[in-house]
């Protein structure tokens, strides 16, 4: 039976506030030390209260878990540690009842080497239908133009399979063979998977690693035209059978290279803006708006029905692939004093430690996230300022259990601490004793309540999700000022990237006669005149102003 | 003579020693029972605390408007109150088990009676708790209502209602515990009557004006009354 | 929900037999045959003028059905007017739930009959009122028309002191009787209202008035003179009524928070008809008792008020309590702050909501006393101006409400 999506507005993803959550890390209901769907179900009230409108679930499918679930061995089931299909359905319905949409992962580029497809492929005869589900070669010298992504662990994109007696192609770990999209059966199977989840009522799909779907000799095997053919087919299949659903593309590329993934509005609805994120951090550290303004100037226009997905931090490292050499060096020096904080081409730390737990900096960055053009994505735990653990391997340091209270295991699970999938953060600054949901709920000025109020405010103004953006160009480069406009609604955002108070004069002549009203406290500021508009901002301060027309005194009109 | 004295001494020493030796296992048992119950209380208390925190007991209490419990709770947390109560109950049970280990009819009977008594005790505690909560809630409602009706002694009235409920539930609790017997009934009747009389006086004194005014109004129909001058809806 | 289902089935069943209608009128107050006969005879006089060649369906409570449809009902030849009996309870004054049920029955019938306008006449039906209200929807393109009642200066005080100015400040429309229970409704608004579902834990879907204002639909008011409002079931106590009205008002505001946070200032509402001339009366106001209640509140309810009111407002109230009767004036600012604080306290559930709203009675009485003393010698026009000034104060302090609504914190001035 096909269940309808939960969103009424087909463009719901434009106004959404997405919350990224790994099921295993959120809440453990059966006390086996691993978070699960019943746990997530129990915490839906918290998420609703926070104000997020869409949950992005990291992979929860059966998997050998050698890449945090991105190595899937069965696309149409739930990993037994996380519960059952029934638990998932129950959670999905409960989320929908609360007006929360649910987005899941569709990892289409590769499977686990444990997946039955791969197992039968390696056994099957070369050239057979089964074998052709994956990319095989007798030599490891094909597609040499393709770079290696996991530079820390992989030496080649080819790995020898002794059973098949051939090399198989993998862009990520060697246990994740890439699917072969030159074989039409592969797409058919992927569409089956997609329909399976959409039929259940899932609202969105995040397509993982899509630039690498297709390989061609003589290219870098990224962003190839044939990839778009595949994507268009996936989108067409979605549009054909379902309303109000969404595809989010994960393409860690330059904006101009990501642009084609929107197609003419007929590929992905949403795509991450990867290069923006490191530049926000860079601008803050440099106390200069240039990196942000520069990258957004390079960002091309996208179709009406499409949107950028914005984030500060996620479950991966703070990726530095989309910056140049010099910028990368600067970022390493600025944000990873300890070499253990680095992994692959990035920095594996959470938002709060990156900001050295300075609440003003954290608030400033979140204010940018919530007011830039795009759909904001909040990583679980960042709303309370959770820390990370660089002593854990891979990127597990930013995937520790959610800190619910000061009780044992941070209130995440009642299992014995040694059975938890990962130790909780216990240090004196970021540990669960100091940073947890319970203590922050009651405190009106806590990071959690700050985030809750800001999300509510963002949702009040549709211009944030739908409006265009225009930068102002004040002389003081420590000040970032921009206008968001949509349908007669104008919002002015001003942010001070410096640690000291800053003056600024804004050229707002176009809005002469209008009155800026500060949105958080609804404070009326002086009317904009012919002169540049002067403002002073405190350290890392920011303002959101609603530009209001001068008040018209309403007259009672007589009727007959 | 000496042999007799010696024998008597030996016998008495043996008796005392025997008695002591008989007592030692009981003592040991008491200490062990105490230790075990203390550990059990700690563990159970911990589990209870976790589960109460899990269901957000404190927040629920507050949202149900039951602030009475938090006022009498340590550090204002009803969870802690419940946990401590349960822990002490477990320790009490441990003590009883320990005492029962003294092989004596008296102690055994006492223990059996204590256990028979236990459900009554629990009911009494629950009664007292709800009595307290209801008393506070009603007292606030009465206070607001009395002030809105412009009754003097509004606070007295609300206090009266509060104590009425508390006394009533306390009497019920004592009845359940079987303490005091008829004295309680009698004392309760006197106290209850006293409170009712006090309330009647408070209302009566307060409404004296009210009554006289309404009589006046009936007598002098033409006189305008403030209530008729204004219409709120 | 069962009641609603029955209503739907009933009206749909009848609708099959009735076909279509231009006008559907609900008369929930006609609980007896005589009342219904009188009402129908009255309404019949304006129908030809209001709807030449049009068809009207009158919904009335089934308690009056047998007699009415047999004796006084239209003959088979007269197809322009038809009576339908449905389960319908009389609407009580300012009682949202009873109005909501009647409205749903009416609007569902209107939808099935494809009516151009639905008219709710909760108070005593009058031909004049029907014409006044229905005209605006039928011929002037309004989606909702409500009556504007003339009232003596000491009447309808909850409306003057709270409902009107608060609705004006929140929704930006100077609608003088936003809680009126008589109204004419367009199919567009009917559709919107029927779509809305009661929020969890609530029994009704809020006011149709605020629903129309938030949807940006056209609203107008029609002068109705000193016409009576629907009755109240029994002699209710002031704090009951106040708590009931406030509760409806605040729950509605909570439901529409996204809408009213974006509204600034206020606009006049198109008004039709002629205002009834009012006599200049000036009786000295008897406010001693009210002030006494306020004093008592200040003495005994201070700690309950303190859960909601900010310290500055509390201090101002205490200062007010010290004033002699002839100087007893509650400044608009203090009154508005107090009301906004109660609104925020209600939203945050600082104590039991019912208790909180009831505890406001003495402060409301202080406002009434202060208002009465101030306007006792005023002319009707000056009283209107006074209420407009109060409305402006509500608007001026809206940022206070907004900032605390957006940024809840107990650390208030």
Image: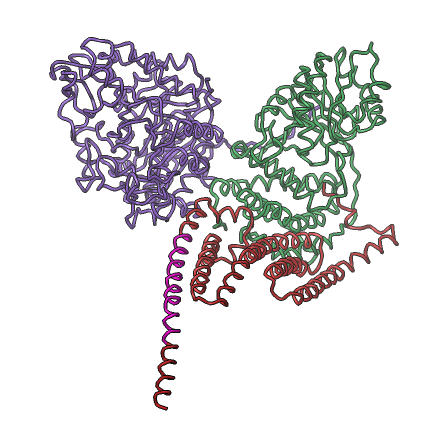
Chain colours: A purple, B red, C green
Residue C271 x/y as whole percent = 69, 27
Of the pair A457 and C153, the residue shown nearer to us: A457
Residue A310 x/y as whole percent = 33, 29
In terms of secondary structure, what is the magenta stretch mainly?
helix
Which residue range is magenta in the image? B17-45
Residue A110 x/y as whole percent = 25, 20
Q: Is residue C114 above or below residue A398?
A: above
Would residue C180 be visible to someone looking at this image? Answer: yes
Decide if residue C90 is on the left or right side of residue A212.
right
Of the pair C31 and C255, the residue shown nearer to us: C31
Of the pair A81 and B207, the residue shown nearer to us: A81
Residue at 65% across / 43% down in the picture? C243
Residue A60: image quadrant is top left
Q: Is residue B225 above or below residue A489?
A: below
Residue C377 part of the magenta segment: no
Would residue A257 be visible to someone looking at this image? Answer: no
How many marks do you count on the picture? 0
Decide if residue C57 is on the left or right side of residue A193.
right
Q: Is residue C361 above or below residue C227?
A: below
Residue A308: image quadrant is top left
Residue B44 part of the magenta segment: yes
Residue A251 x/y as whole percent = 27, 22
Residue at 35% across / 40% down in the picture? A402
């Amino acid at each position: 039976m096909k269940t309808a999506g939960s969103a009424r507005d087909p463009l719901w993803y434009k106004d959404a506030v997405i919350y990224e959550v790994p099921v295993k890390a959120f809440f453990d209901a059966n006390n086996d030390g691993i978070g699960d769907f019943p746990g997530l179900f129990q915490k839906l009230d918290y998420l609703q209260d926070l104000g997020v409108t869409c949950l992005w679930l990291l992979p929860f499918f059966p998997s050998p878990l050698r890449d945090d679930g991105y190595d899937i061995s069965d696309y149409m089931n739930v990993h037994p540690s996380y519960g059952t299909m029934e638990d998932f359905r129950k959670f999905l319905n409960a989320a929908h009842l609360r007006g929360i949409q649910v987005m899941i992962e569709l990892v289409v580029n590769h499977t686990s080497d444990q997946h039955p497809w791969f197992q039968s492929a390696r056994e099957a005869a070369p050239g057979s239908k089964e074998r052709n589900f994956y990319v095989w070669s007798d030599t490891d010298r094909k597609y040499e133009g393709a770079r290696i992504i996991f530079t820390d662990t992989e030496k080649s994109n080819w790995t020898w399979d002794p059973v098949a007696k051939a090399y198989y192609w993998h862009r990520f770990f060697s246990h994740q063979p890439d699917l072969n999209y030159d074989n039409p059966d592969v797409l058919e199977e992927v569409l089956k998977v997609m329909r399976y989840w959409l039929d259940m009522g899932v609202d969105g799909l995040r397509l993982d690693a899509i630039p690498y779907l297709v390989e061609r000799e003589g290219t870098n095997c990224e962003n190839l035209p044939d990839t778009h053919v595949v994507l268009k087919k996936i989108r067409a299949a979605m549009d054909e059978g379902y309303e109000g659903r969404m595809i989010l593309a994960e393409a860690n590329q330059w904006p101009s290279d990501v642009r084609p993934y929107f197609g003419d509005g007929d590929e992905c609805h949403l795509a991450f803006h990867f290069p923006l994120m490191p530049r926000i951090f860079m601008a803050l550290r440099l106390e200069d708006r240039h990196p942000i303004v520069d990258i957004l100037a390079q960002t091309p226009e996208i179709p009406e029905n499409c949107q950028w997905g914005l984030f500060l931090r996620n479950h991966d490292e703070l990726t530095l692939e989309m910056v140049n050499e010099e910028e990368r060096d600067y970022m390493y020096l600025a944000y990873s004093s300890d070499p253990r904080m680095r992994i692959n081409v990035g920095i594996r730390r959470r938002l709060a430690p990156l900001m050295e737990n300075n609440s003003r900096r954290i608030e400033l960055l979140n204010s940018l996230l919530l007011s830039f053009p795009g759909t904001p994505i909040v990583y679980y735990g960042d709303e309370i300022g959770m820390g990370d653990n660089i002593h854990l391997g891979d990127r597990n340091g930013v995937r520790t259990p959610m800190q619910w209270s000061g009780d044992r295991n941070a209130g995440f699970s009642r299992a014995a601490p040694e059975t938890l999938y990962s130790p909780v953060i216990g240090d004196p600054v970021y540990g669960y004793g100091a940073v947890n949901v319970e203590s922050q709920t009651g405190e009106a000025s806590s990071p959690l309540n700050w985030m809750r109020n800001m999300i509510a405010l963002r949702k009040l103004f549709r211009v944030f999700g739908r409006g265009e953006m225009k930068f102002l160009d004040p002389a003081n480069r420590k000040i970032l000022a921009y206008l968001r406009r949509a349908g007669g609604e104008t919002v002015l955002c001003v942010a001070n990237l410096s640690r000291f108070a800053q003056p600024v004069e804004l050229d707002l002549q176009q809005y002469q006669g209008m009155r800026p009203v500060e949105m958080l406290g609804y404070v009326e500021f002086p009317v904009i005149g012919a002169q540049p508009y002067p403002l002073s901002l405190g350290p890392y301060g920011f303002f959101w102003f609603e530009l209001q027309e001068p008040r018209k005194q309403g007259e009672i009109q007589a009727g007959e | 003579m000496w042999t007799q004295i010696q024998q008597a001494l030996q016998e008495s020493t043996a008796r005392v020693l025997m008695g002591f030796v008989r007592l030692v296992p009981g003592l040991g048992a008491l200490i062990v029972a105490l230790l075990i119950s203390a550990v059990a209380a700690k563990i159970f208390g911990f589990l209870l605390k976790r589960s109460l925190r899990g269901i957000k007991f404190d927040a629920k209490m507050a949202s149900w408007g039951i602030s009475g419990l938090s006022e009498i709770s340590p550090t204002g947390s009803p969870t802690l109150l419940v946990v401590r109560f349960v822990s002490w109950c477990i320790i009490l049970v441990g003590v009883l088990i320990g005492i029962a280990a003294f092989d004596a009819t008296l102690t055994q009977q006492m223990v059996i009676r204590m256990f028979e008594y236990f459900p009554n005790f629990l009911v009494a505690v629950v009664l007292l708790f709800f009595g307290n909560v209801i008393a506070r809630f009603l007292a606030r409602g009465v206070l607001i209502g009395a002030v809105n009706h412009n009754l003097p002694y509004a606070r007295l009235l609300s206090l009266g209602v509060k104590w009425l409920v508390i006394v009533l539930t306390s009497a019920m609790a004592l009845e359940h515990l079987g303490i005091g017997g008829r004295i309680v009934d009698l004392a309760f009747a006197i106290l209850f009557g006293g409170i009712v009389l006090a309330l009647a006086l408070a209302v009566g004194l307060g409404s004296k004006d009210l009554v006289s005014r309404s009589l006046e109004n009936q007598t002098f129909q033409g006189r305008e009354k403030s209530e008729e001058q204004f219409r709120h809806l | 929900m069962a009641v609603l289902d029955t209503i739907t089935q009933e009206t749909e069943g009848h609708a099959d037999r009735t076909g279509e209608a231009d006008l559907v009128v609900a008369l929930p107050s006609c609980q007896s045959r005589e009342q219904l006969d009188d009402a129908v005879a009255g309404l019949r006089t304006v129908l030809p003028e209001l709807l030449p060649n049009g068809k009207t369906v009158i919904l009335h409570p089934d308690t009056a059905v047998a007699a009415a449809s047999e004796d006084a009902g239209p003959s088979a030849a007269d197809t322009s007017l038809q009576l339908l009996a449905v389960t319908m309870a009389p609407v009580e004054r300012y009682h949202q739930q009873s109005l909501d049920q009647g409205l749903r029955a009416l609007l569902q019938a209107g939808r099935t009959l494809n009516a151009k306008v639905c008219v709710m006449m909760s108070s005593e039906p009058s031909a004049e009122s029907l014409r006044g209200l229905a005209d605006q929807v039928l011929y002037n393109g309004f989606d909702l028309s409500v009556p504007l009642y003339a009232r003596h200066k000491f009447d309808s005080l909850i409306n003057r002191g709270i409902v009107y100015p608060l609705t004006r400040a929140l929704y930006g429309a100077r609608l003088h009787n936003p809680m009126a229970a008589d109204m004419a409704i367009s199919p567009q608004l009917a559709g919107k209202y029927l779509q809305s579902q009661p929020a969890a834990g609530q029994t009704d879907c809020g006011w149709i008035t605020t629903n129309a204002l938030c949807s940006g639909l056209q609203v107008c008011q029609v002068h109705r003179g000193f016409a009576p409002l629907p009755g109240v079931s029994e002699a209710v106590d002031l704090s009951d009524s106040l708590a009931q009205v406030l509760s409806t008002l605040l729950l509605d505001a909570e439901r529409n928070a996204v809408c009213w946070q974006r509204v600034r200032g206020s606009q006049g509402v198109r008004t039709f008809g002629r205002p009834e001339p009012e006599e200049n009366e000036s009786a000295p106001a008897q406010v001693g008792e009210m002030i006494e209640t306020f004093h008592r509140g200040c003495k005994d309810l201070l700690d309950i008020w303190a859960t909601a009111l900010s310290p500055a407002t509390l201090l101002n109230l205490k200062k007010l309590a010290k004033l002699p009767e002839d100087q007893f004036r509650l400044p608009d600012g203090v009154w508005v702050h107090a009301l906004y604080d109660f609104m925020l306290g209600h939203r945050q559930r600082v104590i039991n909501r019912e208790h909180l709203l009831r505890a406001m009675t003495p402060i409301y009485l202080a406002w009434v006393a202060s208002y009465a003393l101030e306007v006792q010698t005023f002319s009707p026009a000056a009283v209107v101006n006074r209420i407009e000034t109060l409305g402006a104060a509500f608007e001026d302090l809206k940022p206070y409400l907004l900032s605390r609504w957006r940024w809840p914190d107990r650390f208030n001035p």
